[in-house]
Amino acid sequence: MIIEIAKQDLEAALQVVNPCMAGTGSDLSGHYTFRVQDADGGNTQFVEVLTYSNRVFSSCPLKGTTLKDAKHGDAFSVEGWRLKDWLPHTGEGVVVTIEVTGSEVEMKVPWGGMGFDSLDPSNFPWMDKYIEESTEVTVMQADRLAASIDFSRQFASDRETQDRKSCVCVIQKGVFYSTNRIKAAAVEVKGLEESTMRLHVKDAPTAITFLGTTQGEVKVLEYKRGVIFQREDGAMFGSQRYVEAIPAFGRPGEDQRLWVISKDTLKSAIGFLTAGAAKEDKKFRIERKTEDGPLTVSMKTKSGQVKTLDIPVISTEQVDGDLPDLPDGGFPVSNEFLKDMLGLIPGDTIRIGVNVRERQGEKTGFLRFVFRKFGEEKEPETQDEYLAILAWTRELGS
């Protein structure tokens, strides 16, 4: 079999599938696997390149290939790191000729050729059966889907040995849920109402990278054991479904109090106070002594002194009727997680929903952050709703 392809087209396809290839290992998970496929009812042929590792897999068609002595299903592999090391040093604007003879692969450019060993391609876990079993859930802009996954993953736990169920982002009834038990996210994504997608937090960056390879739309295909994203040119990313998942949690729909403050001011206050605190101290205390006064934020220094700063409140809203009082002395939140929120939410100001809960005589609570993006700016019902929740902490360092 002989394949000819422009170097830039080969590089473009490899870039799409690179994230799903294992960095180490001597099996096909560390190789690029190439396969000849039929198109147009068998009238034409094309070559696709595929990779996989653990739960994720990817494929991409090669553009502009010329084939000779090739038939449907012919396949071979090339060790990934070797091809990635060789290809940049072959010259610019060249055509790569690939000659396959049994388990030997030779790639030629005008400067010369290089031989590569091929593993048995029949051992590759082909995506075909998953594609055949899948059904189309929706078609949507890739950047919208990537944004929802990116936001959701930052609220999931990465401590798989301690809390396996919290290491996933799960869609139920059109809402992406994720939590690490202290912070949580619920992203309502228009068009994913029929989806049951479940992505492991470690697979989410690979999915985001794939979605970032196109400015257009992707099909969302799902089968019993996973999800597939397909670009308009046929390139695919797939992720097999993780066994465990968190149950959906309630989404509080209205805040008791709403404080609007400057993001930069709050960010500076966190940086100012944490600079003097013990490294293990994650407790950032927020207090508002009067309903129309400033926020007083505080942390303890390494020596045990309490340092405080006042932050002006730009505006205040609260629901009608009786409200539970805020706890005397304020309430603590994780300084790290609060800083994370400031980096995720757009705009110069931040709207903080403050909610108190009474449990067995003890006051607990949470902060709630909501914003919308995509869709028509003046028509909120068309936009995706991003909801983040940060629970008050109870103990030092929790």
Image (cartoon, rainbow, N blue to C red):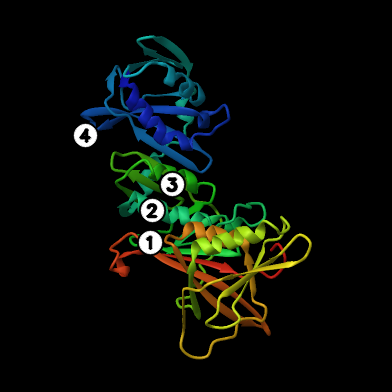
Tag of residue 208: 3
Estimate how packed mark 1 is, as few (under 14), some (14 to 19) or many (20 or more) residues with alpha carbons within 10 Å.
many
Mark 1 or 4: the one toward you = 1
| Residue 310 or residue 186, whichever sits in front | 310
Given residues 257 and 131, the one toward you in this image is 257
Residue 395: x %, y % from top left: 72, 68
Residue identified by numbered label 2: 145
Contact flag, marks 2 and 4 (Cβ < 8 Å): no
Residue at 38 percent across and 45 percent down: it is 211
Q: Marks 3 and 2, Cα distance to the nearest angstrom?
A: 8 Å
Placement of 341 over or under 81, stated as above or below? below
User: Separation of disc 2 and disc 1 at Cα?
Assistant: 8 Å
Residue 126, image x, y percentages = 43, 36
Q: Is residue 20 left or right of residue 360?
A: left
Mark 3: which amino acid? Answer: Ile
Q: Which residue is mark 4?
A: 40
Local secondary structure at mark 1? loop
